[in-house]
Image: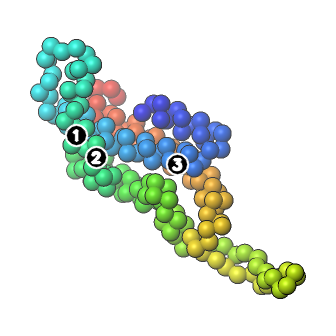
Amino acid sequence: MDTLRHEICGCISFGLNQAAITLTNHLLESLLKYSLAYHYSLNHPKHLGAEQQLAELIMNFTEEGLKKYGKANLNQNINEANRLGLINDEELELLHSFRKKFRNPFGHSDKEDTFDDLSIPVNVATLQGSELISQPEVVVQIAKMPILHGIAQAQLAEIDAPQYFQKMDRLVRKVKTRVFPSSA
């Protein structure tokens, strides 16, 4: 996961905040899938001690865990990680909030989830013949104005990406020590 973390930092450094959120979503999913797979494998060590080529040993060691958790949905993996003690109840809630705020809206391009009921005032005008006539300002919901989606999402990502990544990075470090206690 270090390569993901490095790329996310690069995205944030260069102002590629939507990309940073998307990669942080990938980090979230990878953290859970790999942690669950390794936890499973460490607790079902049928291949340990077998004389095998190293690459074959690694593939065989993680194969069952990856089959079990690799295609499970994020909601299931978050709950399973909590059930197994890889994340605590506070982290469970945090990951579910990330799933709802970042992963689902950005992953599915769901603007209602991205913007919720966020509204902004806009200046409006009408066109009468060839004349543009100003009208009073109105408040619009961003989710209902596709013309605003791109810039509004970029602005939200600029605010959220660094904090989202920092929280995920801290969690990655904590979970690693829970899966591999001797690495602390």
Q: Amino acid at mark 2?
A: Lys
Q: Amino acid at mark 3?
A: Ile
- Disc 1 to disc 3, C-alpha distance: 26 Å
Q: How many marks?
A: 3
Q: Is residue 31 visible?
A: yes
Q: Give x and y (percent) for residue 4.
A: 47, 35
Res 108 → quadrant? bottom left
- The residue to which callout 1 is attached is 67
Nearer to us: label 1 or label 3: 1
Q: Are marks 1 and 2 in contact (CB under 8 Å)?
A: yes
User: Dot 3: what SS?
Assistant: helix
Q: Amino acid at mark 1?
A: Lys
User: Which mark sits nearer the N-terminus, 2 or 3?
Assistant: 3
Q: Which residue is most to the front?
A: 129
Residue count near mark 3 (Cα–Cα under 10 Å), binned few <14, some 14–19, many ≥20: many
User: Dot 2: what SS?
Assistant: loop
Relative to 129, 23 lies left or right:
left
User: Which mark sits nearer the N-terminus, 1 or 3?
Assistant: 3
Residue count near mark 2 (Cα–Cα under 10 Å), binned few <14, some 14–19, many ≥20: few
User: Dot 1: what SS?
Assistant: helix
Q: Quadrant of the C terminus?
A: top left
**Which residue shows up at 56% across the image and 70% down it?**
143
- The residue to which callout 3 is attached is 21
Nearer to us: label 2 or label 3: 2
- The residue to which callout 2 is attached is 71
